[in-house]
Image: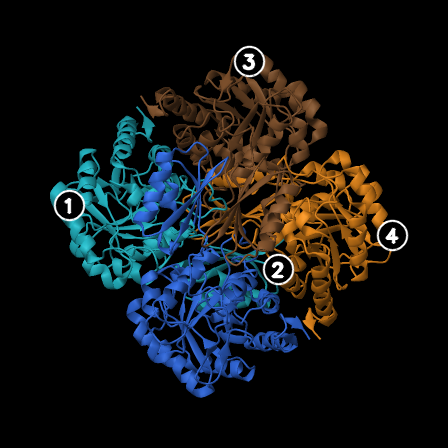
Chain colours: A cyan, B blue, C orange, D brown
Amino acid sequence: MIIVMEQNATQQQMDRVTKYIEDHGMKSYIHKGDLLNVIAVIGNEITINPENIAALDGVSTVKKIQEPYKLVSRTTHPEDTVITFPNGVKIGGLEKPVLMVGPCSVEKDFDGLIKIAKAAKEMGCQFLRGGAFKPRTSPYDFQGLEEKGLEYLAAAREETGLLVVSEVMDTMDISLLCKYVDVLQVGARNMQNFKLLKALGRINKPVMIKRGGAATIKEFMLAAEYVLYNGNPNVILCERGIKGFDSQFSRNVLDIAAVPIIRKISHLPIIVDPSHATGKRYLIEPMGKAALIAGAHGLMYEIHYDPDNALCDGAQSLNLDQFRQVTKSLNKLIGRIDYDNKNNVK
Amino acid sequence: MIIVMEQNATQQQMDRVTKYIEDHGMKSYIHKGDLLNVIAVIGNEITINPENIAALDGVSTVKKIQEPYKLVSRTTHPEDTVITFPNGVKIGGLEKPVLMVGPCSVEKDFDGLIKIAKAAKEMGCQFLRGGAFKPRTSPYDFQGLEEKGLEYLAAAREETGLLVVSEVMDTMDISLLCKYVDVLQVGARNMQNFKLLKALGRINKPVMIKRGGAATIKEFMLAAEYVLYNGNPNVILCERGIKGFDSQFSRNVLDIAAVPIIRKISHLPIIVDPSHATGKRYLIEPMGKAALIAGAHGLMYEIHYDPDNALCDGAQSLNLDQFRQVTKSLNKLIGRIDYDNKNNVK
Amino acid sequence: MIIVMEQNATQQQMDRVTKYIEDHGMKSYIHKGDLLNVIAVIGNEITINPENIAALDGVSTVKKIQEPYKLVSRTTHPEDTVITFPNGVKIGGLEKPVLMVGPCSVEKDFDGLIKIAKAAKEMGCQFLRGGAFKPRTSPYDFQGLEEKGLEYLAAAREETGLLVVSEVMDTMDISLLCKYVDVLQVGARNMQNFKLLKALGRINKPVMIKRGGAATIKEFMLAAEYVLYNGNPNVILCERGIKGFDSQFSRNVLDIAAVPIIRKISHLPIIVDPSHATGKRYLIEPMGKAALIAGAHGLMYEIHYDPDNALCDGAQSLNLDQFRQVTKSLNKLIGRIDYDNKNNVK
Amino acid sequence: MIIVMEQNATQQQMDRVTKYIEDHGMKSYIHKGDLLNVIAVIGNEITINPENIAALDGVSTVKKIQEPYKLVSRTTHPEDTVITFPNGVKIGGLEKPVLMVGPCSVEKDFDGLIKIAKAAKEMGCQFLRGGAFKPRTSPYDFQGLEEKGLEYLAAAREETGLLVVSEVMDTMDISLLCKYVDVLQVGARNMQNFKLLKALGRINKPVMIKRGGAATIKEFMLAAEYVLYNGNPNVILCERGIKGFDSQFSRNVLDIAAVPIIRKISHLPIIVDPSHATGKRYLIEPMGKAALIAGAHGLMYEIHYDPDNALCDGAQSLNLDQFRQVTKSLNKLIGRIDYDNKNNVK
């Protein structure tokens, strides 16, 4: 940490700052300059709040040097995290991107789910997604089939061999989810539900965290840090659009730059969800391709055998014909990208 | 709901839309115009997703007429909700605003908390706030004293007669909180933790919901709707700043207009937290006054007997001297406002 | 400027940085620490771009110490700027706030304008505002009466003694505006029209700059710096709402905290425009009061003798009856505030 | 336009609305329903302000049906605009994307500019960009070489055959710019400088408009509408990042979805500037590729023969070696995309 004192700071004020630092178990080195005095702080600054120091009299600015996250950072863990599932599917690093598809929520029509799952398998997707517990903005919207939905997903896995992803909304449901799914998803609105993140740090299944709509990349990293810090190293990150000032044409702003940024600062896999990001069916293909070529480790998008009658997010779901066509085009691109060579096309 | 068809929409497409509406238990009336065809939908539109209709072929735009929330709306409940506590304190409607003060988190030093509580009582505040469970962005920050913190708060109430507010972060902790506190607070980051909101709908203590940093007013209203819909009518809303593009001088943007807006559209009490909104001690007074004169039913702000050594948010806390001075000035303003007369000064 | 080198930076990289600094006419002092090396830069850093240094190899972070603006800063100019007009009206510092009112645009009906001006005078307002050159988002909207509008404004001044404010959109129109108006307004969309700002620095009439909808406070300060730097010290700042993610109830987010912040960091007067900020008639009064009690040096709001038929912004304009009622209430508040004493109520 | 009346609106209120519509030269059709009354408005609604109608008593909501822009819209102009330059270079439609490269600002070292231009030519780029008039946030930053810079650019064109793009900041400079450059660029901060846009509508050179940092897509379209409406059909749009809440890793948020959205709603060419959007050298390649595969008609990015000593934006400029490597990779991708077939890879 670097503390810059105000030009007219007194010796007494300097002493107050250095005492504060020492009281918190760190060492300080004062650099007296002609123009200003700088205090360098040595020690594990991760546990000190720079705002408290900034509030001391005579302090001009405080600058943390260390990143506030450690376990998710590439600095302390240079090799990519590659998560390998029991059936051999891998996600992360230089592995070929994965495709996670399925309906927004699992609905009563089990045959419909099987139809979706079979189409997904046939097109080479690796994961079936579907919500059993649904976080809905309004209490009047469909809230999910709960355990029945999880049973359906597990049955679809049985039938197709696809891995299954579903959202967990509450610490009380974690053990239930673990019984049925391969990846537990944390929704964007729960990205800073720290009790949930802590509890997910104690399970041994991979966790996928969606970026909150107003979360900075640092906050996103720190959410993942909670899971790793509590013992679970298998975290997948998912960019799904951030809140912007213009929702006329796209519900959120898909922040594709988050992909190369996160690949640079972290070793964790990062995937992209163009369906929730845009809310528009026709944007899934171009934005999915953009995410892949920018380095995403996978895509998650919504499909439904009858989007017009979907209980949730029909407008952003592809029907099965559209799904086949879009996925064919995505697969073609995946086949062209040279993953060993900076995502260049071959 | 009003559905506007595209100019060149076919009869078949119109039929598809009206069938969809009838399948969902509502009636439709077609208005054929020279230029365009409009379909008016009659029925309880609260349960239908306009996006699904917008995705049908031939549909140009869909406009909901009913508000998506019902129980929190002034339309269906014109009289103000005034919450009365066992000790006679009231919040809402035309009642004089309340002051909620205290440290960001309850710390080990019990005497310090008592010092704060006594100062609060002495200055005429009605509520003592303090976090026992702390939602912290980083897992390395202080996470709260948990039950011990709640015991401290209850003891401070015993000593001073102040009502006690503290945050609940997880459904599993609700019954514990209910044992100790007078108001259960939902933090901004949990504003869309719908499991938590539902569970809080089933208790009989008031709930205070803080607006999420990227929550629209509609989303804020719907979060409260969850609590009311599940049976608990006693909800206090709290504006605490929204995420902006400039955090150099103020952490968030305090959206004071939310106060007169919410007083217009809802009957629920709305208070303002200038400490978290700005993150700056010197902004508490001017922004607190601005909120009061704009119609806030109360303020919540942070005080600490030793802010420099606070474990949390010291930079935005007033020390006790500053607290007395600021609160004197706020009380003077409260005394001048004519609450029966549009918040004009007397 | 403080330059923090990466932990593993080489001596060669350090030398490259110090050479760069010296090439730009400044001195550097290296502080070698156990953990990291810090380079302090002494000299007029206002002309160096920290991003260029940050891009040098081995550099971790760069922190400017000096503010990027000088002339508008309270650091270099501690006393408040108070602008005095020929008729004795003053704005800024501890002076009583001023009220600027009028229609969005000056329209053909000259008698209407006079009606507005007389009502304004009668209610104690000091300024008449009205657009002659209108920046309209769409080319199909009314673009203003141009010189004819300016003549009308000058005639209304003749009749009432009010000072006149109108917007300048182009360097070519400056001399024309100077002929007719007392304050030249720079619109929010032109806040970073630097050619215009430079040219306005060379006139001897006060300039009022509206904050851009996405301008940070630093960018706002730098826009004013352009005018002062080019020779004109009489700048009035105007907060008029920033772009947010929710425009359902208020067009923009009125950033009232900008008022106490700017009063702290700058000596220039700062006023608030609640009409453009919210776009809603009923929000003018509460937000106007909030701005005044937070320290605004004045308010600007829109009135019209027939808002339903206004050519521009009718929805946010008060009619004359509403205007009288709102202004009575604002004047009452102004009468209660003790401007010599931190804006406390008497 | 569709006007929905409030449920309890009176006949008198309805009459007031229909009279208002007729006074503005349009026809209205009332649809009386059981639940609500709807007024459909027929006529050229582009010139009426819906907010004025929304402010009439008894009106619930107003929904425009027509887009507010006409000339830039694909609805009224279904075929792509392809701009052809005198040397045969084409931009827009299904043409292969173009590359515009060069330094942020033209500097004194003419040989340096030639070095850049030759490298650009050699790598197959079509345009040389460089600022002669520089819009700088601070008056203390380098403001450009003005006419001398334009001469340099023209000389570089002479030498290499590249087309030249440079920014115009003021109506007074338009004729000067026209003398020297092939495309006049409107900077993001001038996107709503309507006087400038109008004047550019009267020239016969192509104009490139950069999207404002807080401009919605609708506002962006309307800015272009100004130019077309005033007579110039040759407009190129440029997405360059929008203001977000997190600038730690990327200066702005590059809104890549704007590319497929604009290609759907407009016939104008749309290019992307990853340099200004991100402010980071290492993000140019992945974001450039993402933009291309999402359908961009070109890229603009910054290069410099000595970025460390660039007078402007060095941190986001590629040096010539980096430029060659990145451009090779971009060209490879361009070669792989099947522009006749939905931007799929071959």
Please give the residue where the numbered disc 2 appears in the rendered image.
C282
Badge 3 density bin: few <14, some 14–19, many ≥20, Cα 10 Å: some
Please give the residue where the numbered disc 1 appears in the rendered image.
A157
Q: Are the numbered discs 4 and 3 placed on the same chain, yes or no?
A: no
The location of residue A114, given as percent across then percent down, is 17, 43
Q: In terms of secondary structure, where does tag 4 sit?
A: helix
Please give the residue where the numbered disc 3 appears in the rendered image.
D161
| Mark in the foreground, 2 or 3 | 2
Q: Quadrant of the N terminus of chain D?
A: top right
Please give the residue where the numbered disc 4 appears in the rendered image.
C159
The location of residue D216, given as percent across then percent down, is 52, 41
Q: In terms of secondary structure, where does tag 1 sit?
A: helix
**What subunit carries mark 1?**
A
**What subunit carries mark 2?**
C
Badge 4 amino acid: Glu
Q: Are the numbered discs 2 and 4 placed on the same chain, yes or no?
A: yes
Q: Are the numbered discs 2 and 3 placed on the same chain, yes or no?
A: no
| Mark in the foreground, 1 or 4 | 4
